[in-house]
Image: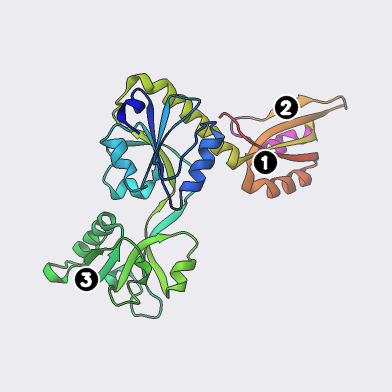
Amino acid sequence: MNAEALDGRLLFAIPKKGRLYEKCIEILSGADIQFRRHNRLDVCLVMNHPIALVFLPASDIPSFVGNGNVDLGITGHDVILEANMQDKVTEIQRLGFGKCALQVQAPESGAIKTVQDLAGKRVVTSFEVLAGAYFDKIDNELQLTGDNRTKIQYVGGSVEAACALGLADGIVDLVESGDTMRAAGLHAIATLLDTEAVLIKSSVPKHAHHAPLIGLITSRIAGVVAASKYVVCTYNISRDQLPAAIQVTPGRRAPTISPLEGENWVAVNIMIEKKQAANTMDELVKIGATDIMIFNLDNCRV
């Protein structure tokens, strides 16, 4: 696709593969961004908005947003820091998926139990910048100098195999469930940071005429994220028990309360966190609520 076809369109960068790709496609669908991506093409035009989707490696997206002409992007918080782009891009919203931790790991059966034990030895990672800064601080605290300082080596993949294959004494890598780490005989000895997928834009807007569309897309994505996080809870309760019920279900701002035909009773309609739904219903039953129902959200605006 040539530059002329993209002229005037908002450019939105999406990870082309990996752990974030499928969830990003769900986000776009929920935000009613309609497109058809042809095989082997990494750029496609959105049919119902003046937007072009650009599919890039997640690690490259912060640079394209911060230094290039791309207006919006979805990538990992960790990738922004690794690319040293935190001053050039703004994290609009964390998206609630792709959650994992960047951790220092060492062989579980070995003598290395702390990062101080690993300092001065060999560390393999795909996060050379973050790992280097972290171990520079540790080395300085331990007053290690010259060849005694920690050696950071970059590899692009299979980081978890580095210790078993004799390349490293420890590694710095992302951990999601921990299954891969344990299968490789490793255990975590420190956490550098927690990360997840984020929606980003350039800290210095490049195309002022795109501001309304950026606001629209940002609002829609916020609604999709909220719909995945919250459910609607409705219940009936006597006015005498209403203050206690509101303590259990305060809502995002305040509950919607409607009078019922029955004397001294009201209906309450509220958004609650999906992960707390079962506990919330149990607490409402104890207080005296009845007819408690939970409804999933397909979409919303918050």
- Counting from the top left corner in percent of width and height, residue 8 is at 35, 22
Give the structural element (helix, strand or loop) at label 3: loop
| Viewport quadrant of the N terminus | top left
Region of the chain picked out in magenta, as a range: 240-253
N-term mark: 3 or 1: 3
Name the amino acid, label 3: Gly
Compared with 11, 196 (above or below) is below
Which residue is most to the right?
262
Q: Is residue 7 left or right of residue 293?
A: left
Residue under the point 33% across and 74% down: 163
| Main secondary structure found in the magenta portion | helix
Q: Is residue 194 visible?
A: yes
Q: Is residue 86 visible?
A: no
Using the numbered discs, state the Cα–Cα distance from disc 3 to disc 1 in whole angstroms: 52 Å
What distance separates the C-alpha of mark 2 from that of mark 3? Answer: 63 Å
Residue corresponding to mark 1:
248
Mark 3 lies on residue: 120
Residue 257 shows which numbered tag?
2
- Specify whether residue 247 is painted magenta: yes
Q: Residue at x 79, y 29 (%)?
A: 266
Q: Residue at x 74, y 35 (%)?
A: 234
Q: Position of residue 280 (x, y in %)?
A: 69, 45
- Left/right placement of residue 143 relative to residue 164 reads left
Mark 2 neighbour class, 10 Å CA radius: few under 14, some 14 to 19, many 20 or more: some
Q: CA distance from mark 2 to mark 1?
A: 14 Å
For the residue pair 134 and 296, the one nearer the viewer reads as 296
* Circle number at residue 215: none
